[in-house]
Image (tube, rainbow, N blue to C red):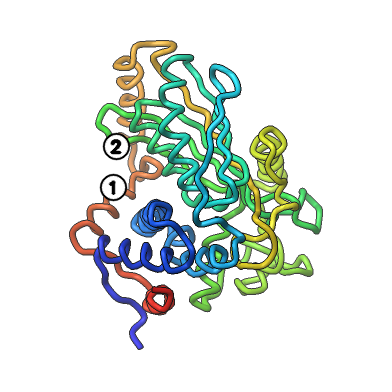
Amino acid sequence: MKQKENISIHELTQLIKSAFINSKVSPTNAAIVANALVKAEIDGKTGHGISRVVSYASQSKVGKVDGFAKPSEKKLKPSVVSINACNGFAYPALDKLLQTLPKVAASQGIALGGVFKSHHFGVAGHIAEKAAEHGMISIVLGNTPSAIAPWNGNKALFGTNPLAFGSPTDDGNHFIIDLAVSEVARGKILNASLKNEKIPFGWATDKEGKQTDNPHEALKGTMLPFGGAKGAAIALMIELLSSALIGANFAFEADSFLDANGNPPNVGQILIMIDPASFVTKPSYLNRVGEMMRAINDQDNTYIPGSNRFFLREKAKKGGLSVNSKIIKEITKLC
């Protein structure tokens, strides 16, 4: 059996949408989630891409995630908006927040949005990029089920807790930083486990606390934070902001994103949005960002973080995506 097959963006999106609709997900939510997963796949974020379809579908079938949920919005203060994802997928809730928050930021100068009773939200940088499309600077934070132990600890309490920053640019190729506080995103280990591929030592430990190159053992153990104690401290900061602040579960209280066992995870996401025109004119800000980007590019062997996505998107648009045949077969079975 061939390992890879080529498929167009449209065909892949429709296939995934059909799989979700057949797995107790509303057509509206199925379309939003399918688009998000395919976009992650296009950008090379495969751990947040189509490898998630089967586990998402298994959870919607049993109600661990409510595929028919309609997120609700509440304005708590002039610059603060809360979204209840209602134990549904995170993407529709974040889309709702992105419809409201740019207007609030334009009015107040800065806006804070929180999403609770949420689920896996994929590529944090995509949220920051959408904010940049509205001309806004943004910071995106979210917690995930427990994967990282406190520094020198042996029991996972923090999630891999994605962190993204976004800024508009004068050329429209918006500047995005996207990272997890783990040495790598947990999704990369999930993807390796699906392909039965080894992972590098230094990514994770097994349940005994020993570093491992086996992704299956790594998923039973803990992730290692980037930067040692500093990474663990940032993970703790994100936990407090994306859970204690907005009424979501801590990582150690949240059931897994990866299977249909347990309760809805009720994790949280935070979106901070800043209107650069609050300090300077927007053209002035964009000019200064452009100066920095050019200064980076003027040095040999440097690159703008996240810029590879533009090449990958153009490549997928012209020639489709080369994807894992086994995963496509599993998705097709759901339709």
> Which residue lies most toward the bottom here?
1
Q: Residue at x 36, y 58 (%)?
A: 38
Give the camera-side residue of 135 and 259.
259
Q: Secondary structure at mark 1?
A: helix
Give the camera-side residue of 84 and 235.
84
Specify whether residue 224 is in view. yes
- x, y percent for residue 315: 23, 57
User: Which label sits on residue 310?
Assistant: 1
Q: In what quadrant of the picture does the C terminus appear? A: bottom left
User: Which label sits on residue 173?
Assistant: 2
Q: Residue at x 67, y 67 (%)?
A: 261
Tell me the distance, in whole angstroms, between the alpha carbons under discs 2 and 1. Answer: 8 Å
Type of residue at label 2?
Asn
Horizontal arrangement in the rendering, residue 189 relative to residue 175 (left or right): right
- x, y percent for residue 252: 75, 52
Give the camera-side residue of 27 and 196.
27
In the rendered view, tell whether residue 298 sits above or below residue 205. above
- Please state the total of marks drawn on the protein image: 2
In the rendered view, tell whether residue 328 sits above or below residue 296. below
Q: In what quadrant of the picture does the N terminus appear? A: bottom left
Circle 1 residues within 10 Å: few <14, some 14–19, many ≥20:
few
- What is the quadrant of residue 114 in the picture? top right
- x, y percent for residue 10: 25, 61
Q: Residue at x 27, y 33 (%)?
A: 172
